[in-house]
Image (cartoon, rainbow, N blue to C red):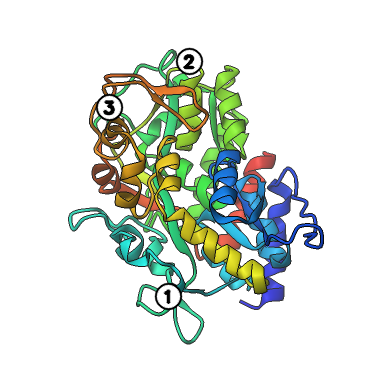
Amino acid sequence: MRRRTFLKQTGSMAASVATTLAFPSIVSAVNRKPTIRVVGTHVTLQEEIKRQAEKDLGINIEFYPGGSAEVLLKASTNPESFDLYEQWSNSIKVLWRAGAIKPIQVDRIGNWSEINSISKTGRISERAQLGAGDAPNKLLYVQSDGTLSQKPSDSVSFVPYVHNVDSFGYNASFIEPGIPYETESWSWLLDKTNSGKVAIVNAPTIGVFDPALAVKAKGLMTFNDIGNLNRRELDQLFEIIVEYKRRGHFRGTWSSVPNSVYLMQSGQVNIQSMFSPGVASLRGNGIRCLYAAPKEGYRAWQGVMCLSSACEGERLDAVYQYMNWWLSGWPGAFIAKQGYYISNPDRSRPFMSENEWRYWYLGQATETNLKGTDAQVSVLAGETRRGGSYQKRFENIVVWNSVMDQYEYSLLKWKEFLLA
């Protein structure tokens, strides 16, 4: 796809983006430390991470967090405005086609050999489901002709770091707790008993899959390939969910983790698409939010660090330092506190307590209360992680966050849904 055509089509996303990000220029004359600008979402662009990285690396870092669609639009149309992009692997096709990111040299990533098989093969074990859609290994390696594939090469489109499986969160004070992998189902998002108290994430490359999984689980329609819907399937899917919206079933959509937390904490929703940090935050504030392990399987994502095509010189070197820092141990241990995994977990284990490792990675009961990244208690002594261990959760993937062949058309349908 030609860059001009792509950018014109991508511009249609603006209608669903609440705000755009401002990126001040770097002023290096006063402070000789290199300064890098990192664009991403609130789930990783946290102040404590920034402070620790600056301390460890001796560089200046500017974080610009925003909603998923917001930062993707900004990065894909203005690569000069950032140095590093942190989001999810479903961003890769968009950024790569737009020429917004460039190859990363594998030999400059010190712990590359430690990165596990999820991003390199799409599976955590031989018996794991690969999952439909854009498994990260399909987009990882840069080929000599500029295409992306799973064939190993000396450069990659992204450095894999944090990752997780997503589902929905529900308030157990209003919805009876289900049994993981047995009774919990994506169909709950469309149950009449939850009408008016449902929200989904406002991100076309993510949000479209949650109602698709719900519609399928409800028996309302089937898909040839749920990771790559065709036009007919998109038309039918949105006809169904637009009708639900017109009946008042959906309370709304959310564009950031803080927004999702507010919706449930304020009592506006009882069930919604959620990311793990939002669940941890709610539990830390006394809300009985449970993160479902749907019997149909999870929607999975791979966190990616991408290099701006406009990044050069000292900023380029500093970005490589920062990417390597993320795989150095402490960051993975910190991000585990909100339920995220790191691509080389053994490196982070020494930075975690035994109870943290047992709970977050092994799926075993913790003997002590565990705190989230906000320092609030999010896990009580005696609890086990819903969905079980790292391996079990990643063996149950139904679909990966993906950019479908009908991506531009799905944007139009998503806009219709928002405006209905």
Place of residue 211 in the rendered image (x, y in percent of width and height, measured from the top left): 47, 41
Q: Secondary structure at mark 3?
A: loop
Q: Determine which quarter of the picture holds residue 367.
A: top left
Give above or below for 175 relative to 133: above
Q: Secondary structure at mark 2?
A: loop
Name the residue: 47% across, 61% down: 324
Place of residue 281 in the rendered image (x, y in percent of width and height, measured from the top left): 50, 27
- Sort mark 2 into few (<14), some (14-19) or many (20+) by Cα contacts within 10 Å: few
**Residue closer to the observer: 341 or 146:** 341
Residue 230 shows up from this direction: no
| Marked residue nearer the N-terminal end (3 or 2) | 2
Asked if the residues shown at circle 3 and circle 2 are in contact, with their CB atoms under 8 angstroms apart, the answer is: no
| Marked residue nearer the N-terminal end (2 or 1) | 1
Question: What amino acid is labelled 1 in the image?
Answer: Asp
Residue 87 shows up from this direction: yes
Q: From the viewer's perspective, tell me whether residue 267 is left or right of residue 37.
A: left
Q: Nearer the viewer, mark 2 or mark 1?
A: 1
Name the residue: 73% across, 49% down: 15
Name the residue: 69% across, 41% down: 419
> Which residue is the site of mark 3?
384
Considering the image in quadrants, where does the C terminus appear? Answer: top right
> Which residue is the site of mark 1?
107
Q: Determine which quarter of the picture holds residue 258.
A: top right
Name the residue: 48% across, 21% down: 284
Query: Residue lying furthest top in this view?
Result: 173
Question: What amino acid is labelled 2 in the image?
Answer: Gly
Q: Nearer the viewer, mark 1 or mark 3?
A: 1
**Residue closer to the observer: 196 or 14:** 14
> Which residue is the site of mark 2?
286
- Sort mark 3 into few (<14), some (14-19) or many (20+) by Cα contacts within 10 Å: some
| Marked residue nearer the N-terminal end (1 or 3) | 1
Question: What amino acid is labelled 3 in the image?
Answer: Thr
